[in-house]
Amino acid sequence: MRDKDRVLYYNEEMENRTAAPSPTIEELRTERDALKKQNAELMLKLKWFEEQFRLSQKRQFGASSEKTPPEQLTLQLFNEAESESDSKVPEPTVETITYKRKKSQGQRQEKLENLPVEVIHYTLPEQEQTCSCCRGTLHDMSTEVREELKIIPPQVKVIRHIRHTYACRHCERHATQTPILTVPAPKAVFPKSLASPSAMAYIMCQKYLDAQPLYRQEQQFKRLGVALSRQTMANWLLYGANHWLQLIYNRMKAKLVQQDILHADESTLQVLKEPGRPATSTSYLWLYRTGHVGPPIVLYDYQTTRASKHPVRFLADYKGYLQVDGYAGYHAIKNVTLVGCWAHARRKFSEALSALPDSAKESAVIAKEGLAYCNQLFKIEQELKKINASDEERYQTRLNQSQPITEAFSTWLQKQAPKVLPKSALGLAIKYCRVQWDKLVAFLQDGRLELDNNRAERSIKPFVMGRKNWLFSNTPRGAVASSTIYSLIETAKENGLIPFQYLTYLFEQLPNLEPQTDEILDELLPWSSSLPDICKISFPQ
């Protein structure tokens, strides 16, 4: 641009500015306030994104354990020396320290004591048991024992069932009718297939216990010299689960809803060929299980959504306590008292503490105080567990020790709520506790209740870990079969059974049960005393 053009452009701009009306003071103040508000909102968003980034870093690179350092198990955070001091405790000696450092003896023997033993003796032939010096007879002076583990890899063999039929020669020649006698034989677990009870149980345990997808099992069988396709194995799984194991599942459900205390949880599942839904849709596997009272029962229920109608339907006949996380879908269930999870509450304060920058000292103190309240309750539960307290003892101890802590915590929550940003991690932790408060303090009503819902989370974990390997189910029918098999395997584990042996026993017995009454099926349940010893775990845990 030439100098003359620049001058003309400058004059034109000045004329335009002079012609435009100057903003009033009120307009400037309004614009300033709007900018301040916008800046505050942007700062809040920035802080929230920074919190999420720190939480993401912790989840990806930090320790996964939620254990709190011992110094945070009390509200007295800064008087450790005074609180832990006890002049009555004697000083340790070198002998006691050395003794504690020694490993306990006999651990190897404990691990091997219930395994089958094959003994090999190395002896001299009788003709060689002669002294080389005086030619006298040698005697067995001592032995040297060495133990080792022998591994027998899987073997596949064909079992050919041949039923013989007998007839009478004399009647064939002289009588009008000939008696024919056929020797009874056990019925096939899957007619017109190569499936045996052990083969069906093995494939199920490989997939749902050891997280081996069918395509990997296909490769393993090929190395064993067996051409067994994944399609064939899938057919066996579906038939075994839906035709036989469903009978046991239904009886376990009938026993489950008769209990007084249950735990529930849910996790996502992808099913590719659901009618009317795209393959990327998210389905759910719901978990329902018993508490520490009564026979251990773990049941999974496949459903297409996370809607409340599913637990409402499943628990329609149930009345009692239901321990859950903070999901609102359980609120629609009638005739139940919902019990909250203090592990979720503590986890949120722990995440809030991890999300804070080093400069946020005041907020860090608040987060530590909230975490300390939760830890106090868990410390009381740890002490009750150490002394193996009864349900009544647990109930009375909670009234005397836990209830004052919950009352103080409630007052603290009301006091801190106005001081923190509602959408910050710390604000959400405080909000969670306040919204869930009635359910969080419900554990005080009965000594059989637990402080957290970790029992359900532990039971849903095998499915979550297995899902990482097989990723999805192909059809709803397959998802239902998977939930049934998982239920049998996890309940067997909870009752101290060997899942492979137990499933094999079921597939041997169920096809030959006549009639299949509830009383007869109850004898096959995982906690039944009628089960053979071969199904039970006998090695030390």
Image: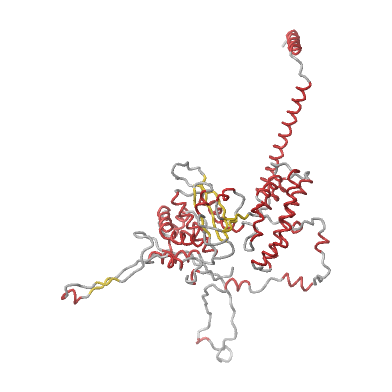
Which quadrant of the structure image shows residue 340?
Answer: bottom right
Please identify the quadrant where the C terminus is shown. bottom right
Q: What percent of the width, then of the height, locates residue 264?
A: 57, 55
Give the percent coordinates (x, y) of residue 329.
Answer: 57, 48
Q: Name, please, the residue furthest toward the front.
A: 335
Give 493 or 416, whichever is nearer the viewer: 416
Front residue of 169/35: it is: 35
Q: Is residue 182 left or right of residue 520?
A: left
Give me the residue at 45% from left, 49% from top: 476
Colour convention of the picture: secondary structure
Q: Is residue 202 visible?
A: no
Q: Quadrant of the N terminus?
A: top right
Residue 302 in sight from this viewpoint: yes
- Which image quarter: residue 407? bottom right
Q: In this image, 81 relative to 511: left or right? A: right
* Percent position of residue 400, x then y: 72, 63
Can you say whether 279 is above or below 343 in the image?
above
Q: Is residue 252 left or right of residue 109?
A: left
Q: Would you place residue 305 above or below residue 253 in this image?
A: above
482 or 228, nearer to the observer: 482
Say which of 311 and 96 sits in front.
311
Query: Residue 19: horizontal and vertical position, in percent?
Result: 74, 11
